[in-house]
Image (cartoon, helix red, strand yellow):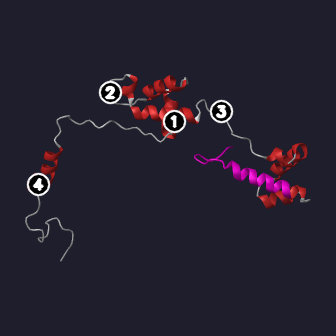
Amino acid sequence: MGNPAGVKRNFVALERRRLKAARLLQQGCSEAETARKVGVHRQSVSRWAGQLAAGGRSALRRSPRPGRKPRMSEADRRRIIAGLKRGPEALGYETGLWTSWRVADLIERECGVRYSNVHVWRLLGQLGWSCQRPVGRALERNEKAIRHWKQVRWPGLKKTPENKAARSSLSMNRD
């Protein structure tokens, strides 16, 4: 059955609920009453009661981390971020455009871990990086002249109504 799409399980809250049920069971509450008080199915309480009897309260504690262990450590992630900031030119590429293939190459060089392009895309999202193209600007660009054109020349060229107080012929209001 699982969780609804996009909803993550709160493992701390789940552990808290199991420990609350253990406390109620140890105080002599029935499984059905414990299930009602905790807000879970009676079968869950029955399973927890078996774990409590077999291994004590520590059997109801959460596991350290669900799922497969990550292949990159936090230090590796920091090295990847530093490599991304240096730019692809530092790896010998001709352009300043990061592609998922190039990032995968960076990860393999820095950490010795090989990922698919799809997983590299997910990793970039987790690291806070998004898809962006580098700004292509001419080296001869004259910022002062551009600013002058935008502030002085363009307003003179832009078409504006001569009499702003006059009503438009397209007015929807009736008099």
Whether residues under marks 4 and 2 lie with C-beta atoms below 8 angstroms apart, the answer is no
CA gap between label 4 and label 3 equals: 61 Å
Q: Secondary structure at mark 3?
A: loop
Is residue 145 within the magenta segment? Answer: no
Q: Residues within 10 Å of mark 4 (few under 14, many from 20)?
A: few
Q: Position of residue 64 (x, y in %)?
A: 71, 41
Q: Which residue is the site of mark 3?
A: 69
Residue 88 lies, with reference to residue 170, above or below; the image says above
Is residue 16 within the magenta segment? Answer: yes
Q: Secondary structure at mark 1?
A: helix
CA gap between label 3 and label 1 equals: 18 Å
Q: Which residues are magenta?
A: 1-23
Q: Position of residue 108 (x, y in %)?
A: 51, 23
Q: Which residue is the site of mark 1?
A: 78
Q: Which residue is the site of mark 2?
A: 95
Q: Secondary structure at mark 2?
A: loop
The image's mark for residue 96 is none
CA gap between label 1 and label 2 equals: 23 Å
Say which amino acid is labelled 1: Arg
CA gap between label 4 and label 2 equals: 36 Å
Say which amino acid is labelled 3: Lys
Q: Quadrant of the C terminus?
A: bottom left
> Of callouts 2 and 3, which one flags the residue occurring earlier in the amino acid sequence?
3
